[in-house]
């Protein structure tokens, strides 16, 4: 477990959903920002998308919600803190994606489940309250989740909303993305990005439509500000090339 970080923003986004946001520079210079998300389910169990360090204050906040039952990796590249979370919550199940199975095994962490390698009808135990859609045709093999009660979509690299003002709010640095300024769902660059990251266009069309059909009003991305309203419109704009 890490020491507390002065740049970490802990916030209750809505009832039973907390985010843990901080700066993160992609490739060492792109101000992407990072964010973990914890959701308390009606059972009292806690579902965590682990994408930032497990600091003492992060753990204190999560522990007040309830026992952690699931530790989630969003895709093939969001996995750096899984072992840290697993060590703190040894009874929790770690769920990732197929591309992480061997990688984490070599590091001494055996995943309890993986989208893409488990049968497509596999249920990990939270699906009554958190729906999942695995994007097998996306370069990073991302997963999108919907917390049904709060109408909140949680994901990592499927949708960006940069600059990440909240993630950089405790540091003396404006998070403007070099050269482009911003990367949000309504811009042409974002549409080109998600189109270019689609390695299987038909699979992308299928999964983009699945998420578009979900009922959500908010999007919590790992990179950039939380979209608090008109989230469905933001998704449909970002994936308009796949939804036509």
Image (cartoon, rainbow, N blue to C red):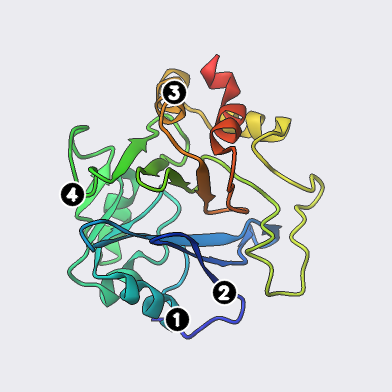
Q: Is residue 101 rendered to the left or right of residue 143?
A: left
Q: Closer to the N terminus: mark 1 or mark 2?
A: 2
Task: Give the residue pinned by disc 1.
Answer: 57
Residue 125's disc number? 4
Q: Earlier in the sequence, mark 3 or mark 1?
A: 1
Left or right of residue 12: residue 48: left
Q: Are marks 4 and 1 in contact (CB under 8 Å)?
A: no
CA gap between label 3 and label 2 equals 34 Å
Q: Seen from this angle, which residue lies furthest right?
A: 179
The answer to whether residue 222 of the structure is visible from this angle is yes
* Residue count near mark 3 (Cα–Cα under 10 Å), binned few <14, some 14–19, many ≥20: some
Q: Which residue is mark 3?
A: 209
Number of residues whose C-alpha sits closer than 10 Å to that of mark 4, classed few (under 14), some (14–19) or many (20 or more): few
| Helix, strand or loop at mark 1 | helix
Mark 2 — residue?
8
x, y percentage for residue 131? 31, 40
| Among the two numbered marks 4 and 3 on one chain, the one whose residue lies closer to the N terminus | 4
Spatial CA span between label 4 and label 3: 24 Å
Point out the tag, 2 or 4, that comes first from the N-terminus: 2
Image quarter (top left, top right, bottom left or bottom right) of the N terminus: bottom left
How far apart marks 4 and 1 lie (CA) works out to: 27 Å
Picture mark count = 4
The answer to whether residue 157 shows anywhere in this view is no
Disc 1 to disc 2: CB gap under 8 Å: yes
Which residue is pictured at 47% across the width and 67% down the height? 52
Name the N-terminal-most of marks 3 and 2: 2
Mark 2 closeness class: few <14, some 14–19, many ≥20 residues within 10 Å: many
Task: Please tell me which of labels 4 and 1 falls first in the chain.
Answer: 1
Kindly indicate whether the residue at mark 4 contacts the one at mark 2 (C-beta within 8 angstroms). no
Q: In the image, residue 92 lies at what x, y percent?
A: 21, 65
In this view, 180 is above or below 22: above
Instruction: Judge from the rendering whether residue 120 lies leftward or rightward of residue 64; answer left or right.
Output: left
């Amino acid at each position: 477990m890490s020491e507390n970080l002065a740049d970490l923003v802990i916030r209750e986004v809505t009832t039973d959903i907390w985010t843990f946001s901080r700066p993160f520079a992609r490739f060492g210079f792109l101000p992407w920002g990072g964010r973990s998300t914890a959701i308390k389910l009606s059972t009292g169990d806690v579902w965590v998308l682990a994408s930032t360090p497990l600091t003492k204050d992060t753990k204190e906040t999560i522990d007040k919600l309830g026992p952690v039952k699931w530790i989630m990796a969003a895709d093939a590249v969001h996995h750096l803190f899984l072992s840290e979370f697993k060590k703190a919550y040894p009874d929790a199940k770690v769920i990732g994606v197929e591309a992480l199975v061997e990688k984490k095994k070599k590091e001494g962490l055996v995943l309890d489940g993986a989208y893409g390698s488990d049968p497509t009808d596999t249920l990990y135990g939270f699906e009554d309250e958190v729906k999942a859609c695995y994007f097998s045709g996306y370069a990073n093999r991302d997963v999108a989740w919907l917390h049904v009660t709060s109408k909140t979509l949680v994901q990592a690299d499927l949708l960006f909303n940069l600059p990440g003002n909240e993630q950089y709010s405790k540091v003396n640095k404006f998070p403007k993305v070099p050269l482009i300024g911003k990367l949000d769902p309504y811009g042409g660059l974002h549409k080109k990005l998600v189109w270019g990251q689609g390695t299987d266009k038909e699979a992308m069309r299928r999964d983009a439509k699945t998420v578009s059909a979900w009922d959500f009003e908010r999007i919590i991305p790992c990179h950039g500000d939380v979209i608090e309203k008109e989230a469905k419109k933001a998704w449909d704009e970002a994936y308009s090339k796949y939804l036509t």
